[in-house]
Image (tube, grey):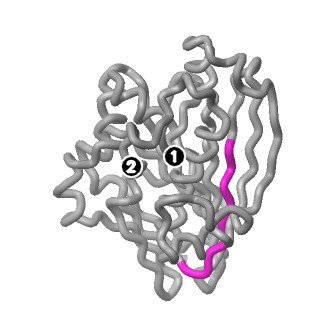
Amino acid sequence: MKKILLSLLAGSAILLTSCLETTQEITLKDDGSGVYVNTNDMGKVLTIAKNMGAADKIPPQGDTSISFASMADSIPNLSAEEKELLKKGSMHTIWNVQDEKFISTVNFPFTSLDEIQKFNRLSGKMAMVTMKSTMPAEMPMGSQEMPEPSSFDDYYTLEFSNGELKKKLNKEKYANVDKDEFLNGLKQAGSMGIPITSTYIINLPRPAEKAEGKNLKLSGDKMKVTVVTTMDDFYDNPESLEFKIKY
């Protein structure tokens, strides 16, 4: 049970009105550059803090915006490459203890799709930094107790060429998914009746000519792709998270 709780608290996954959910939005330009936004709604963490009697040690409310350029060099366990990428980004965090509202939005401009998965991992680390700086000492937030944050995205590759975007399962890496302590902790939480969902939104530079994928939905103007996946999809049929978009 403790490991499950730590997984719920630790990373980029989101607790939202009794379900665990992450939302990632990519706005793509013709040349493959664009903007990556990862919004974490961690309101349930405040619910846990209240239940533990620790909420009175959290500032009652806050609204902050920071540039990662000012703090990248002080974040532990980052490679030189990660620090340089982190300096491109920013984060806006708002919370209100009484309303159990805790939302953190990370924003990164990218020059190529290869950077997206790197930004996804950085977003998880920064969400952890945010929670550790906000939560009182009574909360089990010590990094030595936490599994390294990971996500579904770590097991897929994104390929971009000639107006075609593909997401493909990395079968070799997925073969070892049972060793992923963080995701397996979330899987255990899912087995306890907590729905776990990830939503991906891709804003295209022009209408899609073709969009294929089991869980993919295309907007009426064919400019927005939405893919909603669950923990069950990821473990039972990982190929269902793959997609191919031509525009």
Separation of marks 2 and 1 at Cα, in angstroms = 11 Å
Question: Is residue 160 on the magenta stretch?
Answer: no
Note whether 231 is above or below 33 in the view shown: above
Secondary structure of the residue carrying numbered label 2: loop
Q: Is residue 9 left or right of residue 131?
A: left
Which residue is rendered at x = 49% and y = 52% of the image? 227
Residue 138 is at least partly visible in this image: yes
Mark 2 vs 1: CB contact within 8 A: no
User: Which callout, 2 or 1, points to the residue nearer the camera?
Assistant: 2
Which residue is rendered at x = 61% and y = 11% of the image? 53
Residue 140 locus on image (x, y percent):
48, 28
| Viewer-closest of 146 and 202 | 146
Check the picture and name the quadrant holding the N terminus.
top left
Q: Quadrant of residue 99?
A: top right
Please give the residue where the numbered disc 2 appears in the rendered image.
148
| Viewer-closest of 173 and 141 | 141
Amino acid at the residue labelled 2: Glu
Residue 180 locus on image (x, y percent):
27, 48
Which residue is rendered at x = 36% and y = 35% of the image? 186
Residue 71 locus on image (x, y percent):
68, 62
Residue 206 is at least partly visible in this image: no
Question: Is residue 111 on the magenta stretch?
Answer: yes
Which residue is rendered at x = 60% and y = 76% of the image? 84
Q: Is residue 202 left or right of residue 184?
A: right
Secondary structure of the residue carrying numbered label 1: loop
Please give the residue where the numbered disc 1 appears in the rendered image.
12
Please rate how many residues cluster around mark 2, counting C-alpha atoms within 10 Å: few if below 14, some from 14 to 19, many from 20. some
Please rate how many residues cluster around mark 1, counting C-alpha atoms within 10 Å: few if below 14, some from 14 to 19, many from 20. many
Q: Is residue 237 left or right of residue 166?
A: left
Amino acid at the residue labelled 1: Ser
The mark that comes first in sequence, 2 or 1, is 1
Question: Which residue range is magenta in the image?
Answer: 104-112
